[in-house]
Amino acid sequence: MEKKGVTRRQFLKYAGATAALLGLSESLIPEIARALEELSSGKPPVLWIQGQNCTGCSISFLNTNYPMVAEIVLDKLSVRYHPTVMAAAGDKAFGVLEETAKELAGKYVLVVEGPVPTAEGGEYCTFGLEKETASFHGYQRRKDKPMTAWMEELVPGAAAVVALGNCASFGGIPAANASVTGTKPVQEIVKEIAKDKPVINIGGCPAHPDWFIGTVLDYLINKRVPELDRHNRPKMFFGKLIHENCERRAAFDAGLFLEDWNDDNPDMKLCLFKLGCKGPVTYADCPTRRWNSGVNWCVGANAPCHGCAEPSFYKDLSPLYEPLPEVHFAGLTPMVDTLGWIGAAATAAGIGAHYLYKQLGKKEPEGGES
């Protein structure tokens, strides 16, 4: 770092920013500085592959600023393979992927973006080429390698697997029609290949860059998987309901709800629950972390939370712009006009989330689980 013109003071400030990112105490800054120095010299290898995805989580990752993505890719980690950002292509790129899997077995972190389609022998998602050739109208051609085959090759040697984004973690939008492609979340595929392999799910559509960077740094610094909820999500990012910290919570408590998108009164900051906000059943720190370097988040931009960090997204939380079905607060549905006057009483009794889970027929979670 000194060779790059970075002073010790600047380096400690960088470590302090990392501590803030992870939500850690300032007393841990010296330890983080030491760990980052070790990471800079060791460069833990990362293999990043993409399944049935839109590359949105990669784009979100490229927007990270603390630290900058170039520092992560080039200085802190050894990202050996990433189809979107790497310079190499074709056989040379796939050769790096295969060589790393063999030479650094047990040491690399496997990041999987997007779920894994399994129907038709995995032919719905392929990249790279099989060694075998196949006959095609009398000609011999090399066969595309399905995502399922790559998972069988890369999962056994991974120290840990990170399922990045809601699609990879829980199936997301592709799983809404899984009967066609046989889409499965990454954790299901990993369980079939290596039952005891740790899987860290990072929800979101896309995942916030801090959630990914913070999780990876926490894993590398502490040499262990961070504390997870029952859906294998890091509790430090997915430990509280969005509803708890929403900037429009006061409107909810007062029973002030927006009921028509054409109601142009931006100063009111009305609660968006009746127009589809899924904040009361979604665990994530979006209200406090915000997006685009802390500029804003969905509700702050006058859009409802779609619950994209939850396992039930997309299929069970759609239609996106309609209220949750059969959800009752103190015996009243949000569809009736009388909801307003019971808002404050419901909050005082602490029944908001309680009634949501009760009416949805789910067991109420403990410790920030959903």
Image: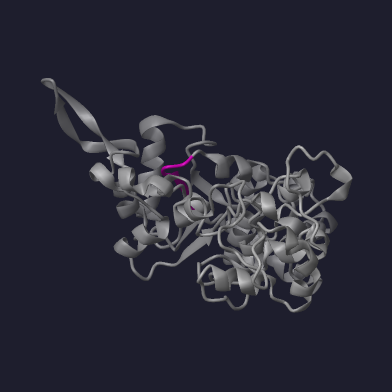
In the visual, does 161 lie left or right of 210? left
In this view, 137 is above or below 187? above
Q: Main secondary structure of the magenta part?
A: strand
Residue 277 position in % (x across, y down): 66, 53
- Could one spot residue 111 in this view of the protein? no
In the image, which residues are magenta?
46-53
Up the image or down, 196 lies above or below 141; here it is below
Q: Quadrant of residue 332?
A: bottom right
Placement of 135 over or under 149, stated as above or below: above
- 3 shown above or below 197: above
Please name the residue shown 65% across and 42% down the image: 70
94 lies left or right of 255: left
Q: Is residue 153 magenta?
A: no
At 59% from the left edge and 46% from the top edge, which residue is drawn?
73
Specify whether residue 47 is painted magenta: yes
Identity of the residue furthest to the right in this view: 267
Q: Nearer the viewer, residue 360 or 3?
A: 360
